[in-house]
Image (cartoon, helix red, strand yellow):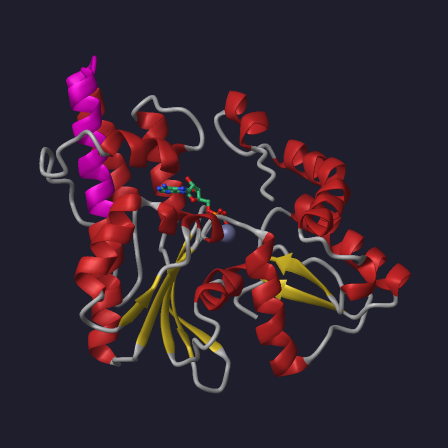
Amino acid sequence: MIRSQDALHAPFGGVVPEIAARAHLQTLIPVVERALETASTRWEQVDAVAVTRGPGLVGCLLVGVNIAQAIAWARRLPVIGVSHLAAHIYAAQLAEPDLKPPVLGLVVSGGHSDLIRWQADGSIAVIGRTRDDAAGEAFDKGARILGLPFPGGPAIDKLAADGNPKAVNFPRPRAPGLDFSFSGVKTALLYDVRKRGELSPRQRADLAASYQEAIVDALLQRVEAAQAEQPVPTIVVGGGVARNRRLRQAAQERLGSLAHLVIPAPELCTDNAAMIGAAALVEWERRGPDPAPFDADPSLGFS
Ligand code: KG4
Ligand code: ZN
């Protein structure tokens, strides 16, 4: 089951941390109960509790980490805290349980654009990161510039379907090595919109498609470069932005011939608990459960 807070944040044009934390507190236990019910599972059949330890908004993480440890204590279950970033990559195992490292991974979310290597020893090395905005942030800010509603990523995705991706040749973000940078393309969009003044529906769709194309192109260019540097058999693309239809299609076209490409189903790309369960299985094999009590870590990396 999926419980979304989007409608609560939409009037504010972005996620409001206090509202997000309160909504977690109000919905988490009913959601756990509903999930067990939907899966026809009794507590006695549960072996362990998995939870996101970070990264993310501290208020939300605290609610999750404390409820998970309370359940584990009350039910005498082991508990394991995982990185939600790594989980975006491990989500691929829900589609392909036999998937194993070495894997080249692209994690594109609201807060991160990271290129990683999940290595044969199980560790994850970050080989590229964003110098400024994350890819999801670029979508969200671009949507605001175009006057589209929150959340911006899906709004641009939808509008871009009716637009011409070649209408405007936005600059491809350039950062050294395998890093990303999206602030330049965002500024280019802002200036373009200001210059035009009133936008017709066609212009708006063309701008959305061209802007999306620039972001997608920049992301895939870095994955291609990393794969050329050190080829691996499997590439995974995950995170909320991996829901983007143009990214999924272009990734298939450009990366599909370079390696076995796995992009989790759209509902497993945006933050979800199934991927946290998948991550817990991977981490459990690597290091076992966590000694409780443990804390949330808003700036946690990939492990
Ligand atoms: O991974 P995620 O659910 O949460 C974070 O960890 O941040 O990613 C959320 C991000 C948001 O920026 C949202 O706009 C973006 O993913 N997103 C999309 C699409 N669906 C969600 N971006 C582009 N196209 C989409 N279809
Ligand atoms: Zn995420």
13 left or right of 2? left
The residue lying at 59 percent from left, 26 percent from top is: 8
The residue lying at 31 percent from left, 62 percent from top is: 179
- Position of the C terminus, as image quadrant, is bottom right
Q: Is residue 214 magenta?
A: yes
Instruction: Magenta stretch: give its range.
Output: 195-215
Q: To which quarter of the image does residue 228 belong?
A: bottom left
Residue 112 at x, y = what percent? 44, 54
Front one among 65 and 145: 65
Does residue 59 show up?
yes
Which image quarter has ligand 1?
top left
Q: To which quarter of the image does residue 34 belong?
A: top right
13 left or right of 226? right
Q: To which quarter of the image does residue 225 belong?
A: bottom left
The residue lying at 66 percent from left, 60 percent from top is: 53
Residue 223 at x, y = what percent? 26, 65
